[in-house]
Image (cartoon, helix red, strand yellow):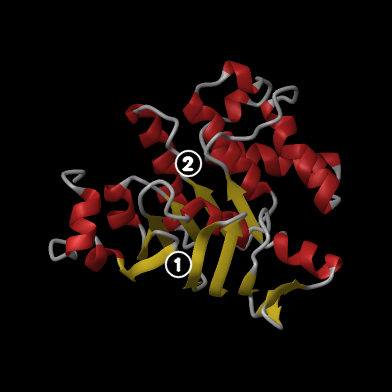
Amino acid sequence: MLRASNIQKSFGETKVLRGVSMQVSRGEVVAIIGRSGSGKSTLLRCLNHLETIDSGSILIDNQAMVTTVDGRAQYVKEKALRGLCLKMGLVFQDYNLFPHYSVLKNLVMPQRMVLGRSRQEAELYAMSLLEKVGLAQKATEYPCNLSGGQCQRVAIARALAMDPEILCFDEPTSALDPQLTQEVLSVIRQLAAEKRTMIVVTHEMNFARDVADRVIYMANGEVVEDGPAQVVLGNDRSAAIREFTGNAY
């Protein structure tokens, strides 16, 4: 479903991604873990074309988003690029909801503007997704009246409204207290049970071990470990993972 090969990314003189390769199969949940500054979020942003890579290749559904020619990244033409980007959905750690839109409008407007759906179709679909995340009763509220956990669940519903083939989460619970964290993780668990293709950057080790099919451990802009969640985070986990997790679980 997604294959990234030898991704290189620098900001000025700082190398952030150093030859990162990964792949995600359809219906698979992949968790990406690692210390802050290891390149996790940058990798996710590169996969969603919020950042451009310096070199390497990214294929989505066997279609090239970017390849490397003469040592430099070359992206496909704009129309094809937009189509590929629509296959990806991203839930940010700070929600990124429109504060001047109601919850319902936050879900409706992207559908109408990007996908060309009618207002009735978009609203019906939006309400079904708000029901799914347990927030149908908040449709007329504004983000300022919601808790952090509720805002993040709205953000998940908004991402789902665009019908992405791959849903990405960038540390979706990092700004939440433990109770609100569990609200959001419960929704993601439900999506995993539906066999949705997902990439989750997270610090929640128990969640990664129990829900993900595979875990990628990054350090210093590189993939250090990539394997089944029960192996990477299991009782026989490596010394590097033990040092990283400490007594987290």
Residue linked to disc 2: 172
Q: Residue at x 70, y 75 (%)?
A: 72
Name the outermost residue toward the bottom. 70
Q: Nearer the viewer, residue 149 or 95?
A: 95
**Residue at the (43%, 37%) spot, across then down:** 173
Which three-letter amino acid code belongs to the residue tagged 1?
A: Glu
| Disc sitting over residue 28 in the figure | 1
Q: Residues within 10 Å of mark 2 (few under 14, many from 20)?
A: many
When the figure is inspected, residue 100 is found, relative to residue 38, above or below; the finding is above
Mark 1 residue element? loop
Quadrant of the rendered image containing residue 38: bottom left
Residue 222: give x, y in percent of width and height. Answer: 42, 66
Q: Look at 25% across and 52% down and name the residue there.
A: 244
Q: How many marks?
A: 2
* Residue 154, image x, y percentages: 59, 35
Seen at 70% across and 24% down, the residue is 99
Q: 231 and 137: which one is in front?
A: 231
Which of the labelled discs sits on residue 102, or is there none? none
Q: Relative to 78, is 34 above or below? A: above
Q: Give residue 239's quadrant in the image.
A: bottom left
Residue 180 in the figure: left or right of residue 137 = left
Q: Is residue 84 left or right of residue 246?
A: right
Q: Nearer the viewer, residue 214 or 189?
A: 214
Give x and y (percent) for residue 17. 51, 63
Which comes sooner in the sequence, label 2 or label 1?
Answer: 1
The spot of residue 185 in percent (x, y) is 40, 42
Q: Is 113 situated left or right of 128 in this image?
A: right
Classify 156 as above or below 143: below
Q: Nearer the viewer, residue 18 or 180?
A: 18
Alpha carbon separation for disc pair 2 and 1 = 18 Å
Residue type, label 2: Pro
Mark 2 against mark 1, which lies toward the viewer?
A: 2
